[in-house]
Structure formats: structure tokens, C-alpha cells
Image: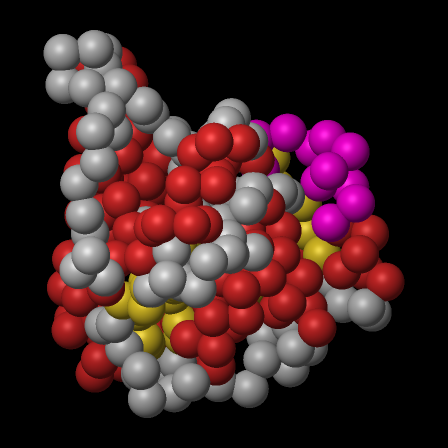
Amino acid sequence: MNLEGKAVLVTGGTKGIGAATALEFAKNGADVAILGRYDDDEAKKVKAAIEKLDRTCVMIVADMGKPEDATRAVGETIKGLGGIDVIIHNAGGGFPAGILEVTPEEWYRAFDVHVHAAFFLCRAALPHMKKKGEGAIVMMSSVAGIQAGPGSITYGVVKGAIPQFTRSLARELGDFNIRVNCVAPGIIRTRFHEKMTPEAKKHNIDNRIPLHREGTAQDVAETVVFLAKNDFITGELVVIDGGMTMRIG
């Protein structure tokens, strides 16, 4: 897909990986709608950076845990950018707790934000993509959805659902030239890991990550854009973790 002039919606696009992804799409000539829960200073900085690249940017305030907001986000993207060609579902968040500690409300909220939002976003956008004869969707999974970690059952389960959603949707949409892929970041230095202790960081770099460094939001953003651009990749999960999940010992 040639991204020049394409319309891209990035959920969770005002911070971290989402912000880096939105900017990377703009650098490739796309117009971008960034979605966040607040139109705060960080959102304004991302919008200004995209506009500095002479691309259009639409800021959408929405909560991906609400189906009506997911549907509305697609409508606002189409209204503001004149269409929708690419969806990047990056909105999410951690839910650290074991099965006896997590509340039912937190459990359902995790599925609403990570999984159900993907369903409603795609339902709203696909009729428009089908008319165009092409489209690209990239979902955000995690290495936590591949391997189990202690005290993170909710996050691991919802992120584990994303690759199967990706495969199933990619199979369904192949006839329409709409591609669906997902990425699974490992330890990426963003706000998500801001509570990590120096000791835990050192342990990760020394013992868990074969490349002995943390990843960056830009590492993930470049991969997401690559998956949107490459016309012959669909139904795939790309792991971006410095080799962490492939190691045996």
C-alpha cells in the first residue's frame, strides 16, 4: 500500500507507541487521526508534530472501552480525513493482578478496551474499506499474550486473543484485499514500564533479552508501518522483543 494521502486511525495515538506510530505514518505521507481519552498537552504535541510534516491530523477524544465510541471514532476519521484506509488498534493498558485479586469489573474492562474495541472498530470501517478495494489493519498484541507471566492473567489473556482475532479476520477479508496483522512488543521503554525498578531493568537487560537492551517505541512504529505498506503479508504476528520469547535458557 502506498501510504501517500491515505487516511489512518491510530487508537491510543497520543502517547508512547501510538504517538510514534502516528508520526511514522505521517512521515510516509499519510493523514492521521489520533485517538485518546484526553485532548491534553501530549496529544497537542503529537498533532502539532504531524501538522509540521504538512499532513492533516484529527484529534478524537474517545474511550475504547465503549462500543459507541469505537464506532464514532471511525465516523470522525472519515469525516475529518475523507475516508479510512488503515486502522491501528493500539489503545490498551495493564491490568496487574492474579485471578483472585482482579475484580470482575477490571476483567470485563480489559476485554472491552483490547478485544471488543477491535471488533467494533472493524465493523464500522470495513464497509468503507471494501468499497475502496484495499485496506490494512494492525492490532497490538504483546509477548504477554505468547508466554505467561505471574500476576498478569487479565493482560495475558486479552493480548493472547488478539493474534487469533487477527488470523480469523485476515482469512475472512482476503477476498477483499484487506490485510490484517498484529505485532507483539516486548519490553519497550514507555510509560507502561515506568514503575519498573532499576533492579528489574538490569535483570531484563542482563538475563532476559538476548540483545541486552530495551526496545523503543520507534522500533514498534516502524514495524507497524511496514505491515501496513507490505501488500503480501496478512494474518501474521510479528514479535518485537530483542529475542526474549525465542530463548530457551
Q: Residue at x 17, y 66 (%)?
A: 167
What are the residue bounds of the magenta stretch? 33-46
Residue 185 included in the magenta stretch of the image: no
Q: Is residue 119 above or below residue 240?
A: above
Q: How is the image coloured?
A: secondary structure
16, 12: nearer the viewer: 16
Residue 206 showing in the rendered view: yes
Q: Where does the C terminus fall, quadrant-wise?
A: bottom left
Q: Is residue 4 above or below residue 42?
A: below
Q: Residue at x 44, y 64 (%)?
A: 211
Q: Position of residue 55 (x, y in %)?
A: 76, 67
Q: Position of residue 233 (x, y in %)?
A: 31, 82
Q: Residue at x 53, y 64 (%)?
A: 219
Residue 45 included in the magenta stretch of the image: yes
Q: Is residue 170 left or right of residue 11?
A: left
Q: Position of residue 196 (x, y in %)?
A: 48, 30
**To which quarter of the image does residue 71 belong?**
top left
Q: Position of residue 115 (x, y in %)?
A: 27, 42
Q: Residue at x 14, y 64 (%)?
A: 168
204, 73: nearer the viewer: 204
